[in-house]
Amino acid sequence: STEGTVVWTKGVCRFCGTGCGLLVGTRDGRVIATKGDPDAPVNRGLNCIKGYFNAKILYGKDRLTQPLMRRTNGKFDKNGKFEAVSWDEALDEMAKQFLRVYKKKGPTGVAITGSGQYTIPEAYAASKLVKAGWRSNNLDPNARLCMASAVVGFYQVFGIDEPANNYSDIEKCNTMILWGNNMAEAHPVLWSRVADRKLTHKDTKIINVTTYRNMSSNLADQTIIFKPNTDLAILNYILREIVKRDAVDHDFVNKHCIFAAGAMDIGYGMRPTDKYAFPAEKDVQAKQNEIKLDKWEAIAQGRKEGQVVKQTQQGGKAGAHWSITFEEFKKGLEPYTLDFVAELSKGDPDEPMEEYKKKLVNLADTMIDKKNDVLSFWCMGANQHQRGVWVNEQIYAVHLLLAKHARPGNGAFSLTGQPSACGSAREVGTFCHRLPSDLLVAAKPARVKSEKIWGVPEKTINPKVGQAFMGILRGLEDDSINFLWTQVVNPFQAAPNSNHWLKAARHPDNFIVVADAYPTFSCQYADLVLPVAMIFEKWGLYGNAERRTQGWQQMANPPGEARTDLWTMMEFAKRIKIKDCWGEQPVPGLKVEGYEDGKLPSVLDAAKEMGIDPEATLYDVLYARDDYTKVAWPDPDLESKINSTAAPAKLNWFPEKALFNEYRQFTLGDGHDLADFNTYMNSTTRGLMWPVVNGKETPYRFNQDYDPYVKEDGYQFYGKLFKAIPTGNLYGVTDPKPVPLPNKAKIFYRPYAAPVEQPDQNYDLWLCTGRILEHWHTGSMTMRVPELERAQPNAFLYMNPDDAAKRGLKNGDYATVESRRGKISAIVQTNQRNFMPKGTTWLAFFDRKVQTNQVVIDATDPISEEPDFKKSAVKVYKA
Ligand code: SF4
């Protein structure tokens, strides 16, 4: 017996995209402690303050242990009180509500909001359920809220998603540039590696390009404070300098890159109608529809001030682009002189202009200097941006022009916020436009491949891209979506402009299911709450920001009747028959070749020919496999599994393995190759960076010395998605005939454009939002750890002391923060942690008491549909 003995098993941190390895201590079926795994290459034994509390997040006092449904007199009632119900009652009602909506609205009326905190098998199961089972693409993760702009940036520049470099470059470079990335708080262990490098190698330089002084500034050689939204102009200044000084690596660029431009006149992805806008929102909505170029935009874009530009709205056209010549590219950069960019972008009114200019020059010098090995890091600052895709593209442009990318010590490195934003949102394809392994729902061969692997008839998958995260919430408001299931996300606290969605959730036609481990803020707005298992209570894999896939085994049973999201999806799928979803289905707005009548055809006959009975359930088709047909909870063999040193293959069933190995089929030979489940679960494996070919991981992609997929010429960018593009000039296509684009990266011309909302007389301050060191996202886990709650119990409103004093506010006072979208109150802080320039305020979103997102604008990048949480206009006054 192992009773009373502590067993240490490898695990992965539940929190950020750094992906630190843990050792998890269990005793008598309970996780009692975690510590940094000394063998983990990411963190080498270290954890941050959150990481050390991975055990305690499992055991908050108010852990949900039973399904809860709003009921009156024993029946579901939207206006009833929450009552504990059995799983059967919960799932039966859920299936009834799902079918009610599905019959009325078809596949586009139902949706799941998922997460970059799903395990990979959970995400894969969700993708199958929604895309093959429901024939809907309304599945979108909260990763849409944090790195969708990075995804599109990768696609547009390289034709394939995810970073080329890896974390070991921190120890190989001598220069690190942070683009709106407060790594010290958001990626603390990576920051420790940065600090180690800096303190042991005195020639290492760090430049923090940011809108306020933050904890990362403490280590930086230089902090450049820019005005919100003007980073694109700064990047164009650097590009101009590279060209002007003839610092372009012409050999690399000629061989491996082409120049491109795209539609400039794109909107901001706000709601296309103002039907639901609050009165104060309407002027911003009007601006969305008709943008008059201001003086900065006019100069930056080589156009006339006051010119009214016709907006290209979301998706499609907004992402269209064409090739241009180097001379055109150079011409586009002409306006971005030092004087112009400095005047446009200087963010601290108290900083002398000459000082600021020197900093910009130093930034360009440092990046250009041939002696410097340069790493650029970015995360939410660049991604949560109305021009987030463009900022991503321009960071790549700088690195590509200098040939400082995809090589040891040199690279543009997009970090992720969530532990498996890469593994479970991007790679598995839980976005509304994606299928596993970089496949796109809009591409027929991708759908055919997926249908084949999933064993479902051709034309089962809906070719129309689904609603992205904000589109799903807007769908609840405009009555196009009436059934929402949220998993591993707290959308009513996490999404911007939340007053709209709080109201929409309670509309009588909408049925909201919230699956969570704790009674989060979103649970208040639910009709049904499902209690779920947490990280070490299930088998799982995460994929971190350096393409490293890491696995862990189940180590404890969840409390009470809490179940995994995977189990819940499977049990739900047992209640829906294929004939419910696979008949002819309406799809509003479907305009795709082969679907001329705007409907998905019935695939029931084709299913019959494949031997699938119309009476079969979605579970039978999607999930039932010989090796996990007998799902039993709690797991009776758990103790033997935990204490077993045997490879998982020798253990009893568990669906995660079969699902992962099925998912792996998508990746093989496709540049995304994953190893098999057992390899990741092996107690000696500390994760592998994909593609994993012949058992070997790939430290650098696109580079022939490291990437087995690169066969020629030193570097090869895949260009998989864009085999050919038309040619044109800065302002549009001149020759629509597509020219081939053989495996080249694109260097874009992307002009500065103003955000849709800026401080004005009524709302005179910027509000930027973000995360802090001690808390994870909406605080639903970390605020339940007493040590973390005590360390930082409140989200403070950081203000410049003069701005505060002008409003009669001092440290510790409550202030009202009001925007066009609502009012909240928060405690003012003027001199700790963050030092704000005049005119800018900052607030975290972890604090349930504050509900920061009630005042944040829901404008999104029009290409990525990622909201801009960093630029709302607010006024602040004494509460
Ligand atoms: Fe590492 Fe991030 Fe976890 Fe901290 S929160 S231990 S940095 S993975």
Image (cartoon, grey):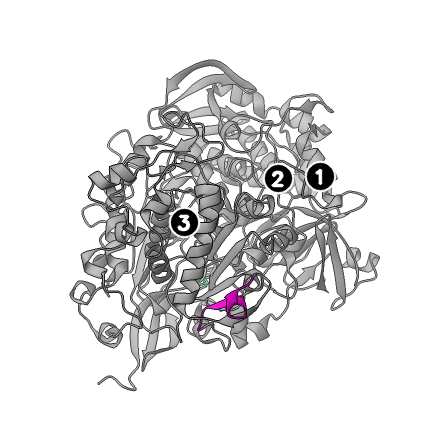
How far is the residue under mark 2 from the one under mark 1?
9 Å
Closer to us: 583 or 445: 583
Of the two numbered discs 2 and 1 on the same chain, state the one appearing first in sequence. 2
For residue 810, above or below residue 162: below
For residue 537, above or below residue 718: below
Image mark for residue 284: 1
Q: Which residue is mark 2?
A: 270
Residue type at numbered disc 3: Ala
For residue 79, above or below residue 148: below
Of the two numbered discs 2 and 3 on the same chain, state the one appearing first in sequence. 2
Q: Which residues are magenta?
A: 65-77
Circle 3 residues within 10 Å: few <14, some 14–19, many ≥20: many
Q: Secondary structure at mark 2?
A: loop
Residue type at numbered disc 1: Val
For ligand 1, the image quadrant comes to: bottom left
Q: Is residue 802 magenta?
A: no
Of the two numbered discs 1 and 3 on the same chain, state the one appearing first in sequence. 1
For the point 69% across and 43% down, which residue is it? 277
Q: Which residue is mark 3?
A: 425
Percent of width and height locating residue 320: 49, 26
Percent of width and height locating residue 657: 24, 58
